[in-house]
Amino acid sequence: MEHFALWLGAFLTLGILSFLYKDNAWYKLSEAVFVGISAGFWFATLFWDNLVGKFWDGKGEEPMLWVGAALGLLMLFRLLPKVGWLSRWPLAFIVGATSGLWLMNYLASNIMSQVQATILPVFSSGFGAGFDADLATIVGNLVIFVGTFTGLVYFFFSKEHKGVFGGAARVGIFFIMITFGASFGYTVMSRMSLLIGRIDFLLGDWLGMIG
Amino acid sequence: MGQPDTAPLDTAVFADSGAVTVAPVESLLAEDHKYDNGRAVDLSWVPSIDDQLVDSKALGYRVYRIVDGGEADSLADLPPFAAAFTDGSVERGHSYVYFVSALSPSGEFPSVHTAPVKPEREWINLSRGWLFLIMLFISAAVIFFVETARRGKKLFVRKIAGLEAIDDAVGRATEMGRPVLFIPGISDMDDVETLAALTILGRVSRTIADYDSKIFMPVSRSLVMTAARETLKASYQSAGRPDAYSDDMVNYVTDEQFGYVAAVDGLMAREKPATVFLLGAFFAESLILAETGNSVGAIQIAGTARPAQLPFFIAACDFTLIGEELFAASAYLSGEPRMLGSLKGQDVGKALAMIVILVGVVAMTMSEAWDVGVMENLRAWLVRVFSTS
Amino acid sequence: MRREIPLIITAVVGIIFVIQYFIPHWPFSKMSDWFSDWFSIVAACAIILGALNLMKLSFLKVYDRKEGWGYAAVIIITFFLMAIVGIAGGRDFRNPGTSFDWLYNYVYIPLSATMFAILAFFVASASYRAFRARNFEATLLLVAAFFVMIGRVPVGYTLSSFMPEGWQLSNLATWVMTIPQAAGQRAIMIGIGLGIVSTSLRIILGLERSHIGGGK
Amino acid sequence: MTTRTKEIIALVAVALFVVIFYIRKVAGRGAIEFPTWLSMLVILLILASLLWILVLTIRGRLIERRVVFLYVGIAVALPLFMSLTQKISVSPEVKQLYDAIVELPEGSKVLLSFDYDPPSAPELQPMAESIIRLCLQRDLKLIIMGLWPQGPQQANLALEKVFDDEDIAAKNLQYGVDYVNLGFQSGNEFVIQRMGGSFQSMFQSDYEGTRYEDIPLVRNVRNFSNVDFSVNFSAGFPGTVEWVQIAVDRFGLDLGAGNTAVQAPQMYVYLNAGQLNGLLGGMSGAAEFEDVADYRAKGTKFMLSQSFAHAVAIAFILIGNVAFFMSGRKSRLKGD
């Protein structure tokens, strides 16, 4: 069984990799297996974790769960053409709740905290006297301040990017590009690591060529 | 646990002769945590005078609690120099007494007990008052501009590159007789990015219905499937072509991220769409989708608020909506004045953020560098207003 | 009415969920907990719709002997295999040693991990084909990427070991990450925050309604 | 020869290769390791072929995607056979996390949240292993949980690996007293939110089904205020962002994070704002942590491949751009 499992894993791994050459039968087979297995995986997981784990087990202690069950049931009304429009209610509910929740979460975490964190000193009369920051910190603070400020200018919609405003927006896009460059670099790092992990499986676990 | 409920004078019992004695903490105060549901008590004290940076005798502190006059229970061990603790494990309807022991290598030196505290719950969290005001301010700005626009005042909004291209991209698909592929990201309906994607779908599909192009929309969440069908149906109806709509335009594949990607990749390779929209919450799959789309020669318009994925969209797609632009897109595309008004409101928020940053930085710099008192007060006030916890 | 009720639900629920942030008192204190449960339950019901849709399409393909119907049959078989093994496995369906766990480990993991690893190839081909220093902005992107990529691996250390401590490639990478990168990131975050606030408001106010079939 | 025949020949060759090496493995032969001269030769060959690609590209022939793919595969695979050592430099955010753990007094409770699944394991598993090892070495108590269904399984794998170590095994640590795995709970960020009120409301029992109140280690742990430090291993949503927004911002948890490299850049914002106490980014973060904790394992081993992979990515960008500028100059000459 252990041999079979390893070979099965390797067969599917190579099947997916074969897409790099071109779309082919081996890939299509692996793709179909993947779609079927993963849909089944989530079906079972949601059934046990959400329907049974959340609702069935908890309904005694928390009567409010019945509201969720009612919403879920309304969702299933889609299967009946006549009352299908009722499924808009749970959708409307979810959309409303999501909007309300995220409005506050993002206002607090993304806007307020980040604005507050950008309030930094950008000059010091005597380094080390009273205020112990070195030149590097001051330069760093200045760069953070300029970058955040001009970045916001770039996202400003009400004004054409012209003149001083346009200049600031251009500096802003420079910072955004540096951010993307750094993200890109880190993503390369991440993806290569994953490939290393996969090759470690093929050459190590499966074929025993590396330790 | 059950440490004996000792008074401070008995501490000598713990310390044998020649042992390290540590002065207990002083001014211990226990207060009900403000503006909560009655779930926390705040403790504060002045650390032991033997708690020193060098050659310290104090190893740290241990917090004890007595519930309703019962046994003392140890709650937490804190490192040296700790001077505050929040007990987040209290319940309403009980009274709590606390004391704090200073720890030394040879024993514990408890402080006096606090007066009993009864946690209470409040109706409104006033510590979030400023947040509330800012929320009101931004909301009011949005509503104000929406109203202004409704009354017919023209509002200027600058051009956003990717959005100008949408009509052409759909037209191209029609000319080539190939389908349009719309991917609304892989998040569920509880993500605002998905909502933004669906609102854009609303506008895009109107064009598609007008041009009579074909649209494919594989999705990875069942709820998104339901919502997307509603969106498409409404668009086809308002374009006056309800007969052209079919539920098969949207189909569920699988919740699994890469299972979904494998299927969409296959679909792209076989159907060769002329235009691909990648709008919504994308994760690692962004590059696989964008590169495969690129390799089949599709025009690609992408947008997401995930900074990690944006460089790849920028590299592999023809147009990319960066972050906030994704959320602005649906308003912009609608061309409806009221929607544009909401963008103006958004800009007011941005202006507020920029002013606060500017004033804050100036105030902080002046107070730090030249010790200007007024500025220090201003800075402290700004920081307080914008603190969330 | 069919159109108005969903809009009213969205608006009322949205406002309640904004308010709950400021009221620590029951029932508002429980709102977000309840919502998470409700959402889980609705999502579990919705996947029935999704699965039915997937099965319907696949069955039709097999029935009509459409191109690629064999793969559709594979989807049907594997879906039922995994779903039945999972449901029949009872509450402990994914414990180590169960059939579900076996399928997970030897079918699901290799497939998803490989799909993930394919990214490495696409990253390289995108690097070769698409990342061009077309203008100053693009050049900045590439330069930042270069310093981060080289500074984060030992090669960078070897290449710059002649430089004084604090000025080596790895220090430079750290500086790029913590200063200009973070500044850009912060501007993007604040922008996104405002975008979400405004989109949410539009939805609560009923200006955006297409996702619930609102139209105009 | 038609393409079809070529494909079949290639397939047969791969099959033969695989069968031969599988038999070799079953026969009990160990790993292959290149001698230094061969390693050097391979490096030279890779460099030479890069030059060749450069020449081709300058001549105006963009090489095919598939060649790029093949190249990446080779450049990542071959270094795994080499045994060259490299010096690693430790970045401050890694040191910060290490210090945060080392400064905890003995017996402190550390919450570890495993928010990833096997596909991200190559990056996060080495981190998880070395952090668990360090914590146990320093006699800290571990409370493990997961917001991703597969997280707790990954935690168990990591624990198993760490217990293989003699000095850790010698401590004779007890499940339920020194460490506990509370398992997975569905509900994403809401799980964190509710843990702020009570852990027990989210985890009625642990991974093995023992009831929460019967586990000595957590019996008195009511919520985040009873935890001294926490580390979150995150591969996406829900992950570090949610932990910061909810557990740190609202409940004041002291949090360090291990992230996939993709996510890491975003975390620097939180790191700067003091919302995160230390950060490991990607496999190199893992290798740096192994270095500072003085225990070299998988992270360090894979670093050579990682270096190669980065070099190849950079080389492709450079080659692409050189060609771009060459052709650009040509078109300008034509008066474009």
Image (cartoon, rainbow, N blue to C red):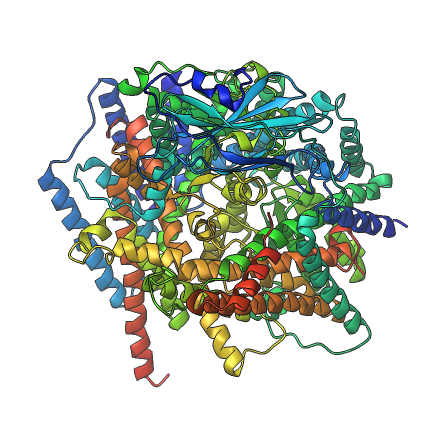
**Residue D45, percent across and down?**
16, 49
**Res. D211 visible in picture:** no
- Residue in view at x 28 percent, y 32 percent: A203
In the image: residue D87, left or right of residue C41: left
**Residue B239, percent across and down?**
78, 62
Check the image and name the residue furthest to the left. Answer: D37
In the image: residue B98, left or right of residue B317: right
Check the image and name the residue furthest to the bottom. Answer: D335
**Residue C170, percent across and down?**
27, 53
In this view, B60 is above or below C16? above
Q: Quadrant of residue D103?
A: top left
Q: Nearer the viewer, residue A132 or D111?
A: A132
Q: Is the C terminus of chain D in the top left, top right, bottom left or bottom right quadrant?
A: bottom left
In the image: residue D150, left or right of residue D185: left
**Res. D92 visible in picture:** yes
- Residue in view at x 74 percent, y 40 percent: B122
In this view, A158 is above or below D95? below
Q: Nearer the viewer, residue B40 or D227?
A: B40
In this view, B343 is above or below D24? below
Q: Nearer the viewer, residue D69 or B302?
A: B302
Q: Quadrant of residue C210?
A: bottom right
